[in-house]
Image: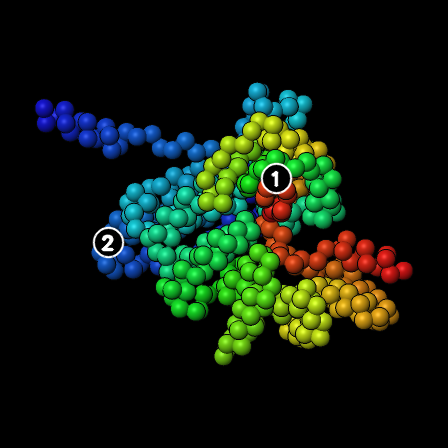
Amino acid sequence: MRIILPIFAIMLTGSVSAQPNCNIYKMDNDLACYEACNKATEAETYQGTMESQRAFDEAIRLCPKLDYAYIEKSVPYLKRGDFVTWKKIIDQGVEINPRRNLGYRAWCRYQFIRDYQGAIKDFELLEKLNGSNLGYSQNGDYHLTIVKGLCYRGIGDNIRARAIIKAQLSVTNYSPMPFDYLHLGIIEFDLKNFDAAIENFQKSIAHSDYLADPYYYLALICKRQNSPTESKANMLKAKAYYSKGYVRKDSYTTPMDKVFLSDIEAHLVSSK
Amino acid sequence: MIIFITFIFYYKVFSQAPPNYPAQVGDIAFDAKLDDPAFKVCDDRNVQQYYSFGKGFQYNGDKPQLKREVLKQWKKLSDVNAMITIRFIVNCEGKSGRFRIQSMDDSYQLIVLSEKVNSQLIQLTRSLSGWIIGTNRERSFDYYQYLTFRVNNGNLIEITP
């Protein structure tokens, strides 16, 4: 009998997409799909096991239109690096319900595979179907329009990335997510627009002062602007935040633009 | 005749063997033709996934150190354009073994690279020695890890996860 580490079992084997309301099928008197839906939602709780995969197969046999079963069946392949199998299975779920699943597939392409071009194609298809509001990433950290911008950054088009992110930040009633200003600051930094970069890092800090990253970049800018004392103060603050655990975390992949402790320490050594 | 046709129908529909899933998606069983018999898995029935510890990618010096070690040994892979994933086990002593390789193109289609390329990448992955032992509540676990190398014109572009 396998032991699933208890602390993270629920968090990491949990659903990747919102569970469907199976009662809808019951109300429509579609009892095969009702049974399939219940099987699939239960199977998701023991994700990755033989029994789970077989239960998804059974759910699909009972209700071939149940996109949720395909999506959930694909997840362990994604998390465990078998992207060929993942793609074959998730594509079937996307085909059944593109409006619900395209954004999620795009997010997976971005987060796990760094398939920026593929993700952009998915986002564009979704925009045609759903309009400009693409929804949010699976981990809740991003609006997917910001991720679309980051995909352009991934393929080296920082100008377009900046335009997309700035446009999203100016959408009425949009509440900035934790890393929006940080990424925009880094893009401005890479474009050598240091005043705009500083402005965005300060906004990032004002939005949530629980990250080492903006201080690291502020330190780099101060160094360029010949303010060594201020640079060192920011870099030391970045290091202190890092040691407190104020870092970007992802259980599955390394986040884009993540600053590492070794980056901070290398700059502290070089500025001695 | 009707009975015979009915039998054939039921045989076709219901007697198909279920897909042959491993106990866990991605399990790697020992293969004497491929694997080093000296590599020991501490508990073969309970190999975790790298993400089960909630700490992300666990390597001494983190991703930058891993990249440095890979780049130091990287030899241009002729004109290869592929995403090459090597999945393996990090045992409860932090040693790696049971390497398996899968390559795909930009359309997520399987491709087969030359034995030379596969062997070069497995050797490179085998040489990485900074894996952090997976622990929870002071107990050490074996775990599955993978590395994906995005290669463009033989050059290493990115390593994930």
Above or below: residue A88 compared with residue A109: above
Helix, strand or loop under label 2: loop
Above or below, A107 against B152 in this view is below
Residue at point 34% right, 56% down? A97
Q: Nearer the viewer, residue A11 or A242?
A: A242
Please name whichever residue, B15 or A78, is drawn nearer the observer in this view of the structure. A78
Q: Give the tally of numbered discs.
A: 2
Q: Within 10 Å of the Cα at label 1, are there few (<14), some (14-19), or many (20+) other Cα atoms?
A: some
Viewed as shown, does residue B13 lie left or right of A94? Answer: left
Q: Amino acid at mark 2?
A: Asp
Please indicate whether residue A43 sits to the left or right of residue A239 in the image: left
Q: Position of residue B54 (x, y in %)?
A: 62, 50
The residue sitting at 54% across, 40% down in the picture is B82
- x and y percentages locating residue A15 in the rendered image: 46, 53
Q: Quadrant of residue A249?
A: bottom right
On screen, residue A88 versus residue B32, left or right, reads left
Q: Quadrant of residue A152?
A: bottom right
Residue visible at 43% across and 69% down in the picture: A132
The residue to which callout 2 is attached is: A30
Q: Position of residue A223 (x, y in %)?
A: 82, 67
Task: Quadrant for residue B132, please give it.
Answer: top right
Residue B39 seen: yes
Label 2: how many Cα within 10 Å (few below 14, some 14–19, many 20+): few
Amino acid type at circle 1 is Gly
Query: Disc 1 marks which residue?
Result: B154
Query: Along the line of sight, which residue is nearer the eye, A117 or A174?
Result: A117
